[in-house]
Image (tube, rainbow, N blue to C red):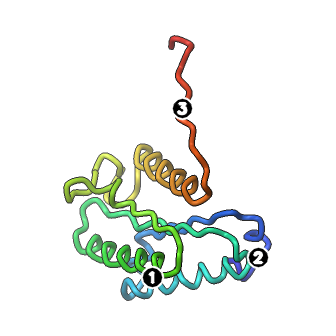
Amino acid sequence: MAEKDPDQFRELDAAVLHVGTNNISDADNSDKVCEEIKHTIQSIKSANSDVKIIVSSVLPRKNDRLVNDMIEKTNTSLQTMCEESGHFFLNNSNTFIHQGLVDASLYRDNIHLNAKGGKTLGTSLRSALNNVLGIQQSPPLADTTGC
């Protein structure tokens, strides 16, 4: 992507890479997914060495234990890669898994997020961006209209 059009990355302060379960099912193993992400990061960094990278972990699937085992291995590899290379790893497991179970209220089916799940992921991504960029997020303004 960055190799084809490096101009799109020159003005960025941060980039979020979110790995999906299609990446997991298309790969032979978690190391291949991690290598693909490393290559993507290298491409982005070659266009803009100052951009901060956030790698957002793969979200679990609602009812697929085998895929979730692969997701967990992939996320562990991605987290290690981020720690070794100085990138920010956003661990979505803390938000999408409670007491060892995937929070079904965030999914419209076994794979895709519903509106609540999308908002939850968006809030996590915004928080990660604010953290990486050093932006203090203001609390929401109180509703003074009486509504």
Residue 33 marker: 1
Per the image, label 1 sits on a secondary structure element best described as: helix
**Residue 10 coordinates in the image, percent (x, y):** 77, 70
Question: Mark 2, residues whose alpha carbon is within 10 Å: few (<14), some, or many (≥20)?
Answer: few
Image side of residue 77 versus residue 130, left or right: left
Label placed on residue 5 = 2
Q: Which residue is mark 3?
A: 140
Question: At 24% from the left edge and 74% from the top edge, which residue is drawn?
Answer: 66
Label total for image: 3
**Disc 1 residue crowd, few under 14, some 14–19, many 20+, Cα 10 Å:** many
Q: Amino acid at mark 3?
A: Pro
Cα separation between marks 2 and 3? 37 Å
Taking the spot 45% from the left edge, 53% from the top edge, the residue there is 121
Q: Position of residue 9 (x, y in %)?
A: 73, 70
Return the mark for residue 15.
none
Mark earlier in primary sequence (1, 2): 2
Task: Provide residue 43's location: percent of width, then percent of height.
Answer: 66, 82
Ranked by sequence position, the earlier of labels 1 and 3 is 1
Which residue is at the front of the view, 138 or 104?
A: 138
First of labels 2, 3 by sequence position: 2
